[in-house]
Image (cartoon, rainbow, N blue to C red):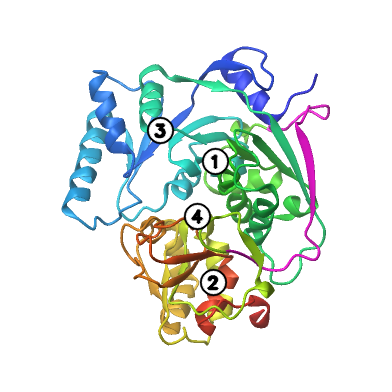
Amino acid sequence: MGKTIAEKILSAHSGKDLIADDFAVCKVDFTFGQDGTSSIIIDRVKELSLASLKTDFCMVIDHSSPSPSEGVSRVHKKMRNFAQEFKARIFDVGCGVCHQVIPESGEILPGDLVLGADSHTCTYGALGVFSTGVGSTDLAIALATGKNWFKVPQTLKIVVKGKIPKGIFAKDIILYIIKEIKSDGATYKAIEFCGEVIDKMDMDARFTISNMVVEMGAKAGFMPVDKITIDWLKERGVNSEKIKQISADKDAVYEKKIEFDISKLKPQVAIPHSVDTVKDICELKRIKINEAFLGTCTNGRLQDLKIAAKILKGKKVAPGVKFIIAPSSRDIFLKVLELGIADIFVKAGAVIVAPGCGPCVGTHNGVPSDGEIVISTANRNFKGRMGNPNAFIYLASPATVAASAIKGYITDPKIFL
C-alpha cells in the first residue's frame, strides 16, 4: 500500500513501517524555541540536568524584538546565556521571525522532522518538511532524548485548480479554504496541497498557505518538492545533493480528497473574532479602519511587500490610519531597501518597524486602542491577539491591506491593480 508524505517521513524517522493512526517514537532532526517559549524550555533543560542537547537546536528572539520591557529583557539575557552555555545558535534582535529565518538558514530540508515551540511551525511544510508545533516541555524532552512520540496523522489531499483572478493572492486562497473546512475541520490531520494553482506558486505564496493550516486544526501542511523548492533552497546555499525529492506514492491512501476551483474567487476577509468567519470583500459594507498591519510569518515576505509597494507607489495612507510594516527577516528588509520599496512605504506615510512578530502578537509596535479596527496580514484575529481584547481585527491579503490603508476603509485591491 502506498504512503502519504506524513507516513513516509515518520516511518523513516522511527525505523518502522507506519500508517495513519499508528503511534511511534521518532528521531527529531531540528528543534527551536522563540522568546515567548524558550524561558520554559531552558527551565526544563536545567531541571533535567542536561550536559548537552541531543538535537540541533536554535532560539529566535522575535516576539518582543527589540525588548519593550525590563521583564522581557531578562528573558532575552537568559536565552543568550543558555545559547552560549550549550553552543546553540541564536537569532538575536533584528534577525526576524522564526518561520522566516530558520528556512532561510538552510538548516531544514525536505523529509526532515522538525519540532518548534510555536504553533505556526507548520510553515516549513512548504519545503516538504514534517514540522509541527509543540509545548515547551515536549520540546525540552526532544532536547534531552533526541526523540519524541507521534501519532501518524490521517491526510487530506487538497487540490487547488482554476485560473487565478485579478486581485487574488495566496492569502485569499487559504482564507477561502479555511472558511470551507472550518477551524476544527482538519484537527490532527496532515494536508497535502497540489493542483495547477499550487504548482505555479512561488515559495513565498506556498509558505503563506502552509503557515495557516494550523488555523483549521492541522498538524502539518505539505507543498510539492519541485524545481521551485529546489531553486529556493539552492539560492540559500543548500547543496542540491542534500535535497530529497519527497512525495506521496500514487496509490497513497487519503482520508479525503477535496477540490477547490478558485476561478471566480473574490478577495477574502476574515472578520472578528475567528479565522474561519470569512466573507467575500464585496459582502462587507464600508468598514472604516484605524490601523493597517503588513508583516508576520504569514505575509511579511518579499513578494508580499512588493505587492503592497506596487499599490502604494505615489499614494498616501489615509488620514487617521496607522500603517505599520514589519519585514519578516533582516535579509528581506535589506532587499526592501535595495529595491527602493522602503522609500515607497515611508513616503506614503507608513511606519517600518524592526523585523519581528511584535504587532501580530500584541507585545509592542502597534497595540490598538479600545474599539479600534485593524486590517492585518496576520494569521489570527482572536480577541486580544494584537494586545487589546477591545479591538477588532480583520485578516486579508497584503494587497487588500495596502488598498485599505490608502482608502481608510476595507477595500477591494483590484481598483489599484
Q: CA distance from mark 4 to mark 2?
A: 15 Å
User: Which secondary structure lies at badge 3?
Assistant: loop
> Residue at left 20%, top 36%?
81
Q: Quadrant of the C terminus?
A: bottom right
Mark sitting earlier along the chain (4/2)? 4
Disc 3 target residue: 135
- 83 or 145, nearer to the observer: 145
Disc 1 target residue: 122
Report x, y in % for residue 221: 63, 40
Is disc 3 surrounded by few (<14), some (14 to 19) or many (20+) residues within 10 Å?
Answer: some
Disc 2 target residue: 401
Mark sitting earlier along the chain (3/1)? 1
- 268 or 406, nearer to the observer: 268
Q: CA distance from mark 4 to mark 1?
A: 15 Å
What segment is highlighted magenta in the picture? 245-270
Between marks 4 and 1 in the image, the one whose residue lies nearer the viewer? 4
Is disc 2 surrounded by few (<14), some (14 to 19) or many (20+) residues within 10 Å?
Answer: many
Which disc number belongs to residue 380? 4
Instruction: Name the quadrant containing residue 1.
Output: top right
Q: What amino acid type should be assigned to the residue bearing mark 3?
A: Gly
> Residue at left 57%, top 37%?
239
Q: CA distance from mark 2 to mark 3?
A: 32 Å
